[in-house]
Image (cartoon, rainbow, N blue to C red):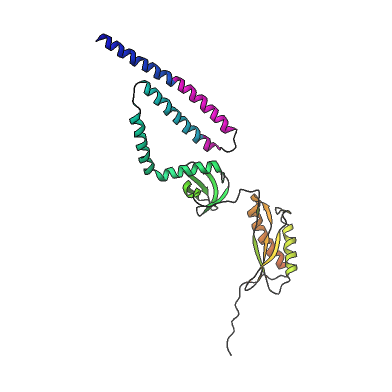
């Protein structure tokens, strides 16, 4: 009886010692692996801080689960039922939290592809605003009237994303209507000279000023100057005001919609 107890203790003691050794060595290997992974991500421009944090967290947990499974096997624990249970539990949890997992997956895709950054003006999911925060579940935006909007990442990644801040320059599209009796060349010259007085407008590419439509009450000219992206709204507002004032000064009529009614005598 004593010999049996002694052999059992030695056997279990060996298993415990081996399990402890596995945990110690495993912890050292995990620390080294995480350090190397972090260095590799720091040297790549494809990873932002959000994605780095996610990858490090997932890798840390997966590696420790593997080490713990090896350590438990040294203690004689059968891991087959545990692995089977993980599979069943994962299926149940995946079904129950499919929306959350969808947002998580979309957050990862946004972090990898980076269609926008914090501070960008974007239009997505029917909303227009400046991105103020981005995490793995949702994106926060601030609208022009200072409202905060939180959009699930799945709604963003699953639809169109228009990034108004992605490029260094933007085109300001305007339509100016002049009367049918007005001189088109004079109007184009007046518009061109007026645009030159607006400092943020770029000289290259040159502004486009052309007749675009023969409307019911006016001849419509499309006016398309270019500017730096941060200057877009300043140019938009200043150009409209200066063009109106310049056309008035040049005696070029800007007509309003009108309807001629003829009655029978």
- Magenta stretch containing residue 48, yes or no? yes
Relative placement, left or right, of 62 versus 237 is: left
Q: Which residue does the image show at 28% across and 12% down from the upper left?
A: 5
Along the line of sight, the residue nearer the viewer: 177 or 92: 92
Q: In which quarter of the image is residue 189?
A: bottom right
Along the line of sight, the residue nearer the viewer: 53 or 4: 4
Residue 10 position in % (x across, y down): 33, 12
- Magenta stretch containing residue 246, yes or no? no
Q: Is residue 146 above or below residue 13?
A: below
Inspect this view and state whether residue 152 appears: no
Q: Which residue does the image show at 27% across and 9% down from the upper left?
A: 3
Relative placement, left or right, of 179 versus 100 is: right
Q: Which quarter of the figure is the N terminus placed in?
A: top left
Looking at the rendering, the stretch of residues picked out in magenta corresponds to 24-52
Q: Residue furthest left?
A: 1
Residue 162 position in % (x across, y down): 56, 52
Relative placement, left or right, of 219 versus 35 is: right
Residue 149 position in % (x across, y down): 49, 49
């Amino acid at each position: 009886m004593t010999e049996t107890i002694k052999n059992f203790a030695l056997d279990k003691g060996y298993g415990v010692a081996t399990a402890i050794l596995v945990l110690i060595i495993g912890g050292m290997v995990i620390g080294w692996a995480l350090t190397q992974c972090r260095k590799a991500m720091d040297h790549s421009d494809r990873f932002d801080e959000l994605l780095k944090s996610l990858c490090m967290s997932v890798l840390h947990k997966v590696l420790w689960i593997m080490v713990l499974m090896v350590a438990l096997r040294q203690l004689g624990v059968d891991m087959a039922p545990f692995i089977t249970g993980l599979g069943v539990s994962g299926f149940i949890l995946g079904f129950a939290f499919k929306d959350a997992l969808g947002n998580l997956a979309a957050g990862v895709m946004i972090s990898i592809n980076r269609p926008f950054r914090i501070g960008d003006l974007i239009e997505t999911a029917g909303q227009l605003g400046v991105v103020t925060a981005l995490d793995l579940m949702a994106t926060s935006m601030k609208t022009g009237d200072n409202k905060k909007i939180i959009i699930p990442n799945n709604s963003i990644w699953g639809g169109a994303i228009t990034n108004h801040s992605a490029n260094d320059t933007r085109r300001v599209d305007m339509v100016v209507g002049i009367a049918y009796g007005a001189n088109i060349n004079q109007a184009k010259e007046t518009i061109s000279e007026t645009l030159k007085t607006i400092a943020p407008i770029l000289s290259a590419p040159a502004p486009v000023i052309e007749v675009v439509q023969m409307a019911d009450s006016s001849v419509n000219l499309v006016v398309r100057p270019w500017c730096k992206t941060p200057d877009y709204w300043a140019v938009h507002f200043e150009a409209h005001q200066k063009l109106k004032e310049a056309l008035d000064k040049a005696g070029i009529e800007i007509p309003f919609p009108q309807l001629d009614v003829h009655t029978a005598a």
